[in-house]
Image (cartoon, grey):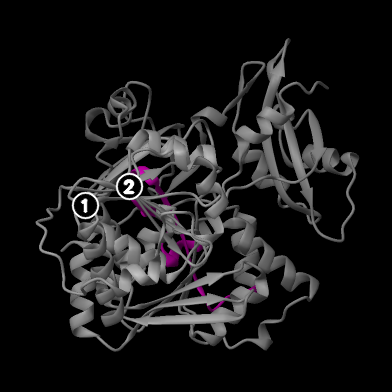
Amino acid sequence: MRIDEMLARNARMYPNEISLVERNTIKGTRKEITWKQFEERANKMANALMERGVKKSDKVLLLMYNCINWFESFFGIIRTGAWVIPLNYRFTSEDIKYCNDLCQAKVLIYGQEFFERVQTIESKLPSIENYICVGEGLQKGAEEFEKVMGESSEEIPQVVVRDEDSSGLYFTAGTTGPPKAVLLTHKNMESAAITVCVNECKRHDDNFVFLAPLYHVGSTMRWFGNLIVGGRGTMLLGTRPEYILEAMSKEKGTILMLVVPWARDIVEALERGEIRKEDYDLSHWRLVTLGAQPIPASLVMQWKEYFPEVQYDTGYGLTETAGTGVIHLGVENWRKAPAIGKPGFNWEARIVDENDNDVALGEVGELIVKGNGIMKEYYKNPEETAKALKGGWLHTGDLAKVDEEGFIYLVERKKDLIISGGENIYPIDVESVLVRHPKIHDAALIGVPDERLGEIPVAIVEVKIGKTLTQEEVRLFCEDSMPRYRRPRRIIFGKVPRTLTGKIEKHVLREKYKRETI
């Protein structure tokens, strides 16, 4: 059953139950929509798009902050058989142009916050025939979202859509280079819904609270698990620790998805006494899941000290796998952190060498996976597609190893590996040690060019609020905690840049410090 069919079924089975809540703690607003209303408005958007000439396999750009209108637009688009193309809301005007040059979209649906970015490049988007804007501040020729919806039919459009048909084009994060356009099918999205639902044991009475941006598959596809059971979802705008705990309390949240920076902020705010668990009703909360990057074991242990009654899980996935849950730890295995776990429901995984032969137990190789969530292709990039899907397995580009119990551990991205004096240095190993220091909030390790050694490891260290730290303290800590060849040759105090999904932007750091010398 496709995800849009799941939506229609929920509208029939739970018409008056709440499907989505939009909670903006910063503005003090809260909106909600029932399954029946959700279904009707998705149909309205689909019919409005078809009236404007959108047909099967056309492309529609979607540029909005997290909101209910985003979901209505998403499902409306795929109901027409067109491809939905969610854009990163941090994209510049030129980034938006780059994406449209590749996909040649027919319609752009965007929030009023992006008015200036869109207006700047309007003349450079010749393929776009219609602009639909949520809110005020319309550019010339654009239509207002609610007016478009109000003039359209709520009847389900009669379009033949098959599981194998393409449904969405997602641009990768680009943390190791230019973003690639990942083409997903309806079957991929259905697979994501099933995997997450099974992995998290979702129930009809669950309320999944999520903060991550919807343009990222890890957020959207994880919510798709709710579709199977007709469970409620709550979007939270605002990532401060008190906002998160308040949402879990007031919305009676049962499942929460976080990335490392948000989880660390909550733990540190509790340590400083800025928030207190006792001030919130967290009795409904049963599961927290972290993902989007390797999770330091020290953070998991700290988390369980503060929230021993909440189940913990780690989820691993990629844009190319239609989201997370491809590998997951399992709530009974939290003490195995920093392992990412074992293959999730309906997935297989292997660790292989450069010839795709399985490596020995404990040896480092590339993680490759197989399952129904694997992308169709990198759009208009047959060479990269062939490399990534060699032998029917998705080659993730992540280096990993497996232990005697079958648990998989991420070691590093291939492109982030540092080779110094002939020794392989995996930044994750060093970063996980550094963040154990009681004064360090975050850390990143990069390689910078060196004439003698090829590369040298350089640590960027972000100090906790209210703490002071010297380079000598960090050096002494490293001497006690890791072998000599892994120790950073230079320590730089500064902010560790991360994407909105928590991944360290190594390319930004490498560009900034590539000319630095010891």
* Residue at 56% from the left image edge and 85% from the top image edge: 249
Residue 514, picture quadrant: top right
What span is colored magenta in the figure?
306-334
Amino acid carrying label 2: it is: Glu
Label 2 with label 1: CB-CB less than 8 Å: yes
Residue 383 visible? The answer is yes
The mark found on residue 53 in the picture is 1
* x and y, in percent, of residue 195 in the image: 29, 60
Characterize the local packing of mark 1: few (<14), some (14-19) or many (20 or more) Cα atoms within 10 angstroms.
some
Q: Position of residue 404 (x, y in %)?
A: 41, 45
Q: Within the magenta stretch, is there residue 313?
A: yes
With respect to residue 386, does 157 lie above or below? below
Q: Is residue 441 above or below residue 176?
A: below
C-alpha distance separating marks 2 and 1: 9 Å
What residue is pinned by disc 2?
129
Residue sitting at 22 percent across and 80 percent down? 11
Q: In this view, does 476 lie to the left or right of 253?
A: right
**Residue nearer the viewer, 226 or 302:** 226
Sooner in the amino-acid sequence: mark 2 or mark 1: 1
- Does residue 226 lie above or below 191 as drawn? below
SS assignment at label 2: loop
Examine the structure image and report whether residue 498 is included in the region drawn in magenta.
no
